[in-house]
């Protein structure tokens, strides 16, 4: 389980110029837990023998993952250039995490297919996130963690699918 840092990023921050920055906004409040999740995923991957798995590859593997996706679709979804995606896919292909195979619906295009090694890495990633969820459930209590999860699910719905306020 990851050790939780008891220090807080949320005490009054001061800029280099000495001006108070003020309390963190929602972006920072979401970023700090995400960074904890990323660190833990990489730690678990490296512990389980995926020591060639770089932090940049987590973008490709983030939910719902690259399986059966065209590189151009993945680039759009991740808001990355096609060149950047293809660079990362090339590295992951050389490391045997995935393959780019001809698209049966459009032979001019390719589809991403996870290899056995890629699927094993996904299992490690999911297990690592489950460990974080367990830790946060213990920290917040089951009721508050469930509420946090429900609120995040609500925020991730398309605007027209959200419950009225």
Image (spheres, rainbow, N blue to C red):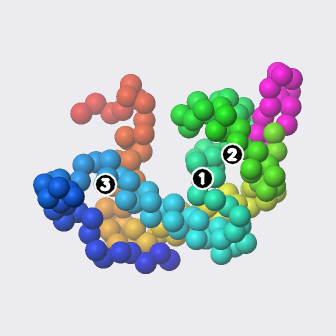
Badge number at residue 94: none
Q: Is residue 39 above or below residue 3?
A: above
Return the disc, 1 or 2, that comes first in the chain's sequence. 1
The residue wearing badge 3 is 29
Q: Quadrant of the C terminus?
A: top left
Q: Residue at x 37, y 59 (%)?
A: 32
User: Mark 1 sits on what residue?
Assistant: 56
Quick check: 78 left or right of 30?
right
Quadrant assignment, res 35: bottom left
Q: Which x, y percent locates residue 75? A: 62, 33
* Position above or below: 128 against 81: below
Count of numbered tags? 3
Can residue 74 be seen from the camera position used here? no
Give the residues in magenta.
Answer: 101-113
Dot 2 crowding, Cα within 10 Å, few <14, some 14–19, many 20+: some
State the image coordinates of residue 43 (x, y, percent, origin top left).
58, 71
**Residue 79 lies in the magenta-colored region:** no
Residue 88 badge: 2
Tag 2, which secondary structure?
Answer: helix
Q: Main secondary structure of the magenta part?
A: strand
Disc 1, disc 2: CB below 8 Å?
yes
Q: Give the secondary structure at mark 3.
A: helix
Instruction: Determine the CA span between mark 1 and mark 2.
Output: 8 Å
Question: Around disc 3, counting alpha carbons within 10 Å, would you say few (fewer than 14), some (14 to 19), or many (20 or more)?
Answer: few
Compared across the picture, whether 21 is left or right of 93 comes to left
Disc on the earlier residue, 2 or 3: 3
User: Which quadrant of the structure image shows residue 89?
Assistant: top right
Q: Which residue does the image show at 74% across and 50% down from the upper left?
A: 91
Of callouts 3 and 1, the N-terminal one: 3
Label 1 sits on a secondary structure element that is loop
Q: Residue at x 27, y 65 (%)?
A: 9
Disc 2 to disc 3, C-alpha distance: 28 Å
């Amino acid at each position: 389980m990851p050790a939780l840092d008891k220090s807080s990023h949320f005490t009054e921050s001061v800029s280099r110029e000495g001006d108070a920055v003020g309390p963190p906004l929602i972006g920072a409040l979401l970023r700090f837990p995400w960074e904890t999740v990323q660190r833990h995923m990489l730690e678990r991957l490296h512990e389980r023998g995926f020591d060639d798995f770089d932090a940049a590859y987590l973008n490709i593997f983030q939910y719902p993952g690259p399986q059966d996706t065209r590189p151009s679709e993945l680039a759009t979804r991740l808001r990355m250039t096609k060149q950047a995606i293809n660079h990362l896919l090339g590295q992951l292909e050389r490391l045997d995490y995935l393959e780019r195979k001809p698209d049966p619906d459009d032979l001019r295009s390719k589809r991403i297919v996870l290899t056995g090694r890629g699927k094993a890495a996904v299992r490690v990633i999911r297990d690592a996130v489950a460990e974080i969820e367990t830790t946060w459930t213990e920290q917040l209590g089951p009721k508050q963690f469930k509420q946090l999860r429900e609120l995040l699910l609500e925020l991730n719905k398309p605007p027209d699918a959200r419950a009225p306020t």
